[in-house]
Image (cartoon, grey):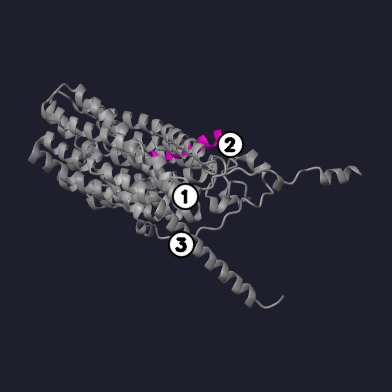
Amino acid sequence: MSLKDEETVAPAPTSDIEEPYSIFTQGEKWCIVSLIAFGGLFSPLSANIYFPAIPTLAVAFHKSIELINLTVTLNMVFQGLSPMVWGSISDTYGRRHSFILCLLLLSLSCVGLALTPTSDYWLLLFLRCFQAAGSASTVAIMVGVVGDLSTRADRGGFLGLASVGPMVGPAIGPVIGGILADKLGWRSIFWFLCISSAVCTVVLILFHPETLRAIVGNGSIPLSPIYHPVVPIIGRDGRRRFAASTTALAPKNKFQNPLRLLLHVDIVLLLVITGIVYSVFYGVTASIATVFHDTYPQLNETELGLCFLTVGGGMSVGSLFCGRLLDWDYQRLQRTLRAEDPSVRQNDTSGAADDAFPIERARLRLLPAFLAVFVASCIGYGWCIDKRTSLAGPLVLLTGVGLVVIVIMNSIQTLMVDLIPTQGSAITACNNLVRCSLGAGLVSAIQPLLDALGAGYAYLLLGGISALLGPLLYLVMYIGPRCRARRTRIEEARKEKEREKERAREKDAPPP
């Protein structure tokens, strides 16, 4: 055999190499998730950093506080609506471009806000809507990226890290906004957002690879240059190893209306649970400044802003804790079921969804205990405020509220991605729509509620409403497998119909 022949037959075919669910190494996955967590920071940051400047803006624009608060309301409306569009776009046309365009829209809108004349109040309203349209969608796309990279077995940990950015925003936003507005003026808030989001955009352009499985499969499918990062170092070795792979190809996603997800009973129940928990949480945090100002008048504005750090600290710790908890409990339940029935599939690396595995039970069985802690913390916080206890009391309870609420929301968010992994961004958009709608309603009602009932009974009422969600968690665990089986049957019937149409087209096609 000649040297030329040896060179021809020596390389082993890549089809003989077992393909992983994703070609990215574990370290590369954590790197990608860290990048998108940085981008996801801007969704809550752009909303919360604005709050300390509201009185200053009222003076500058010669408008009442109520009219300036209208910019907050419209911002929340677009926070709920815009991910419905961008989430579906990213599920169809790719994560990388969608993420970059959202941040670019945020950065440009902040330039306009920083230059808005104080005589043009309408322009402030208009640009705040565009700001929300760019920033709010980053979280939905972020969850879609996590769904692309992870299997059920490790999805909790990745989603926990990705959520750190969005959870830190509400804590540091008011602090940064207060300092900037006090030292440099209200326009500096928008310049800060413009510069920081532009930096994040450049980082993503340089390093963030495309991950949508309908485009890249497990990451090994060759792509046109427009999908490549400028510095394609993430996944380089994996792409080289599986360059000739064909089994990684995935069917293209068609653009789907995210509102159709609301036709699934189990999804609706999960959205209701997270929506109510989030609205109660937002009712607590949105009133912190007012409640603490009345209860502890010795606190100045800077000290009031620092009080928000307790909530953000609890949420940040809860994000990381929740991820590890979800992965640990998933694997624990899997081992238990495999001991009882060896046919239970071990899907840690394949990414295949085992319909017989009780994924609802794996994600939700610990949540009733966390919900009880959330209820107790909310009620305890209300009575601490009502009885004017030491400041340490409500601050400790706020930390507990932040820690527990993120465990509840991340667990349910992870489950929803598990149930419909091909529409991770769209389902997050639906979640965002429900949460923002309920949250906006409760924020508008919390002050009248506090005035009418007092802090103790007001938060007792909100805690009682949250307690009613416990039975819904058990209901989802009960009906979830039936809903999944129905979705599987419908999807298989749809695919079979498409195959029949394709066979009919081939049969009717003229011979070459």
Asked if the residue under mark 2 is in contact with the one under mark 1, i.e. CB atoms within 8 Å, the reply is: no
The local secondary structure at tag 3 comes to helix
User: Which quadrant does the N terminus fall into?
Assistant: top right
Q: How far apart are the alpha carbons under marks 3 and 1? A: 16 Å
Outermost residue toward the right in this view? 1
SS for dot 2:
loop
- Residue occupying the point 76% across, 43% down: 12
Decide whether residue 106 is among the magenta residues.
no
Residue 39 lies in the magenta-colored region: yes
Q: Label 3: which residue?
A: 490
Magenta region: 26-42
Residue corresponding to mark 1: 421
**First in residue order: circle 3 vs circle 1:** 1
Residue 356 on image: x %, y %: 48, 48
| Occupied quadrant, residue 386 | top left
Q: Quadrant of the C terminus?
A: bottom right
Mark positioned earlier in the residue sequence (3 or 2): 2
Gap in angstroms between the C-alphas marked 3 and 2: 34 Å
Residue 146 rendering spot, x and y as whole percentages:
47, 42
Query: Is 75 drawn above or below residue 159 in the view shown?
Result: below
The structure residue drawn at horizontal position 22% and vertical position 50%, both measured from the top left corner, is: 121
- Callout 2: 10 Å neighbours few (<14), some, many (20+)? some
Single out the mark in the foreground, 3 or 2.
Answer: 3
User: Which residue lies under the disc numbered 2?
Assistant: 25
Q: Secondary structure at mark 1?
A: helix
Q: Earlier in the sequence, mark 1 or mark 2?
A: 2
On the rendered structure, is 38 left or right of 463? right
- Residue type beneath disc 2: Thr
Nearest to viewer (mark 1 / mark 2): 1
